[in-house]
Image (cartoon, grey):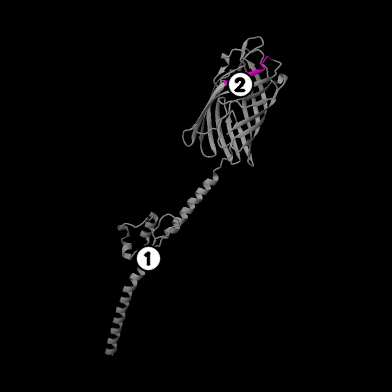
């Protein structure tokens, strides 16, 4: 019995030693299975670096040693709370970049894209610009004007200064009711400047120094200085604020305020809600059409049939419909037909004032 007991003790001791050796070897190997994959460069096409293996001793002192690479705060916290956590930073980075790209695509899709050679930007056509050729139809007491001019419009681009001498010639049909001369003229010097101050703010100045007369009466009374100053502030690609003044220098109205907003509702529809020239424009295929309002008229020094000098002021309101035609050089000709109403012809002397009947106007405008 004593022999058997000694043999059992010896066997147990050998087994215990063998188990201890096995545990001593196995524990470090198991610890090496804990790996941390640090983030690589933020590029989807790049290859991630090889993982770095930390032992339990290194993990225990993780906060006391500098980290290699870029470890985000949430990764550091996860490691501190549970060293056994394996963080796949590559997957998190890819998801973040995809979400960012999606946001940019959505933001781009929400922006409207203005296009079309005539309506890429809003420009105010005011008293400082030469008048386009037009025909206000009228006979007898209806009062008509056939007007054409020699001045041409320069392309409106930032930093452009244009100046020239121009002449508008107005052939008057009627009226029999009062003694308006059959021919009146606008001889003027035109000056226009436009520039971009910031990425969003631009302005333009239009100015005319001229003599508006029949060259029969007192030319001095026909000297006028019409002009306008208008600023444009782009809130974004779709919305532009417009503000300024239009100096008419006429007996009836000296100054008109200019103000409103130009909005691209989409790439084929825009609304220029700007006083005193509101306009709605839309595109059909490659052509733009529009409907707009206008405050028209002018003033001239004339000689009456009694050989007395006087100043006459004509004004009206217009609703016009137009469409564009673009040539190969990018020059755009706009053709318009409109209804003219609330017409008034008034003299400084007050003699011969009357209201002509409503009529129709035909006009062509060359723009760039």
Q: Toward which corner of the image does residue 262 lie, by quadrant?
A: top right
Give left or right: position of 115 versus 72.
right
Magenta region includes residue 180? yes
- Taking the spot 31% from the left edge, 76% from the top edge, the residue there is 21
Q: Residues within 10 Å of mark 2 (few under 14, many from 20)?
A: some
Residue annotated with mark 2: 298
Q: Toward which corner of the image does residue 87 lie, by quadrant?
A: bottom left
At mark 2, the secondary structure is strand
Residue annotated with mark 1: 34
- Taking the spot 64% from the left edge, 21% from the top edge, the residue there is 170
Please name whichever residue, 164 or 252, is drawn nearer the observer in this view of the structure. 164
Residue 241: where, in percent of width, then height? 53, 33
Q: Which residues are magenta?
A: 178-187
User: How many angstroms separate mark 2 from mark 1 (CA)?
Assistant: 89 Å
* Quadrant that contains the N terminus: bottom left
Residue 270: where, in percent of width, then height? 59, 37
Give left or right: position of 295 versus 25.
right
């Amino acid at each position: 019995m004593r022999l058997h007991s000694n043999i059992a003790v010896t066997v147990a001791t050998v087994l215990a030693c063998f188990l201890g050796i096995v545990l001593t070897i196995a524990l470090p190997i198991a610890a090496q299975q804990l790996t941390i994959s640090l983030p690589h460069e933020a590029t989807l096409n790049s290859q991630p670096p090889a993982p770095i293996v930390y032992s339990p001793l290194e993990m225990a002192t993780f906060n006391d040693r500098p980290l290699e690479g870029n470890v985000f705060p949430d990764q550091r916290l996860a490691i501190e709370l549970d060293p056994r956590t394996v963080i796949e930073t590559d997957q998190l980075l890819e998801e973040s970049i995809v979400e960012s790209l999606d946001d940019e695509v959505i933001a781009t899709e929400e922006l409207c894209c203005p296009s079309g050679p005539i309506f890429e930007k809003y420009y105010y056509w005011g008293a400082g610009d030469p008048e386009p050729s037009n025909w206000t139809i009228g006979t007898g007491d209806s009062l008509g004007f056939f007007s054409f001019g020699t001045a041409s419009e320069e392309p409106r681009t930032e930093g452009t200064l244009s100046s020239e001498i121009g002449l508008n010639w107005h052939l008057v049909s009627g009226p029999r009711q009062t003694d308006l001369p059959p021919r009146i003229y606008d001889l003027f010097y035109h000056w226009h400047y436009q520039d971009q101050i910031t990425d969003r703010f631009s302005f333009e100045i239009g100015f005319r120094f001229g003599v508006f007369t029949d060259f029969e009466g007192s030319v001095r009374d026909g000297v006028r200085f019409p002009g306008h100053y208008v600023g444009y502030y782009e809130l974004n690609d779709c919305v532009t604020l417009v503000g300024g003044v239009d100096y008419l220098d006429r007996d009836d109205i000296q100054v008109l305020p200019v103000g409103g907003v130009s909005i691209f509702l989409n790439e084929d529809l825009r609304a220029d809600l700007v006083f005193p020239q509101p306009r709605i424009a839309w595109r059909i295929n490659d052509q733009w059409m529009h409907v707009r309002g206008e405050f028209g008229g002018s003033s001239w020094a004339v000689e009456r049939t009694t050989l007395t000098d006087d100043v006459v002021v004509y004004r009206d309101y217009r609703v016009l419909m137009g469409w564009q035609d673009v040539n190969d050089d990018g020059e755009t000709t706009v053709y318009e037909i409109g209804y003219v109403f609330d017409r008034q012809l008034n003299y400084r002397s007050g003699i011969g004032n009357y209201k002509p009947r409503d009529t129709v106007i035909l006009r062509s405008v060359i723009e760039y």
